[in-house]
Amino acid sequence: SFIFNDFDKHMKRYVSKVIDVKNEGCLRTLPSPVNDVFGEEYYLSLNYGRLSIYAPDYGYRNVRMKRDDLQGLKNDGVYYGEIASGQQEPAKLLISLRDIVEIKPLPSMQGADHTINHLTISPDGDTFLLVHRWYQYGKRYDRLLCIPRDGSDLQILADNSMVSHVAWINSTVVAGYFRNTKGKDGYFKIDTRSKKEE
């Protein structure tokens, strides 16, 4: 089976569909879009409407949104949904953008527009990565966070204004292109426990 995001015209909201390859049919429709999944157990979602405004390359535009349409940082962020249970309720807010912004806030975050992107679940499903991006006076800033599945403890892995794509090497080490603690841009590995860079 595989999963992809879609738009429900009747409900006027983004959903995701699980497709059975052998039987060529839709096994079920989840009531939220997915950004990453862990097997058939759970998925993480985010607000694609927010991305359509601030990062249009990643957002969806079936529903045209303006800044005034967005929920506040307290009511938007990372959403968690279950797959195996057949849950029909939309994914629940796990971590708010406000929570993310309040972790070691930087001066450039004041009055900025905030998004999250690139949710990436670890191979063992226990933690996930996210890229927190904010936009201030036409400039983009990034940082990389690592978070347990239950959203209990947010850890910053890279916080030097530039993070591109990242991936898990194993359940404790990530690799990606970002700016390291010495201000150098390049490909690095980070141990999510020790925070050691290579």
Image (cartoon, rainbow, N blue to C red):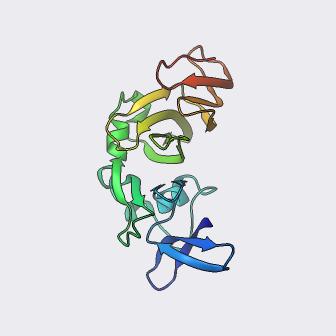
State the residue at coordinates (44%, 64%). 84
**Residue 120 lies in quadrant:** top right
Q: Which residue lies furthest to the top in this view?
A: 182
Nearer-the-camera pick, 181 or 150? 150
Q: Left or right? Give the position of 44 relative to 75.
A: right
| Res 17 seen here | yes
Q: How many labels does the image show?
A: 0
193, 53: nearer the viewer: 193
Residue 48 vs residue 78, the one in the foreground: 78
Q: x, y percentage for residue 135?
A: 50, 42
From the viewer's perspective, is residue 126 above or below residue 19? Answer: above
Q: Position of residue 128 (x, y in %)?
A: 48, 41
- Can you name the residue that lies furthest to the bottom here? 10
In screen coordinates, is 114 left or right of 55?
left
Q: In this view, does 8 lie above or below 79?
A: below
Residue 89 image point, x, y percent: 35, 70
As drawn, the residue found furthest toward the front would be 22
What residue lies at 46% left-to-right and 59% top-to-bottom? 47
Please state, as top left, top right, bottom left or bottom right, where the C terminus lies in the image.
top right
Residue name at image x 48 percent, y 18 percent:
194
Quadrant of the image containing the N terminus:
bottom right
Which image quadrant for residue 61? bottom right
In front: 87, or 187?
87
Report the side of 159 relative to 176 (left or right).
left
Image height of 65 relative to 92, above or below: below
**Dividing the picture into quarters, in which one does residue 185 lie?**
top right
Is residue 136 visible in the rendered image? The answer is no
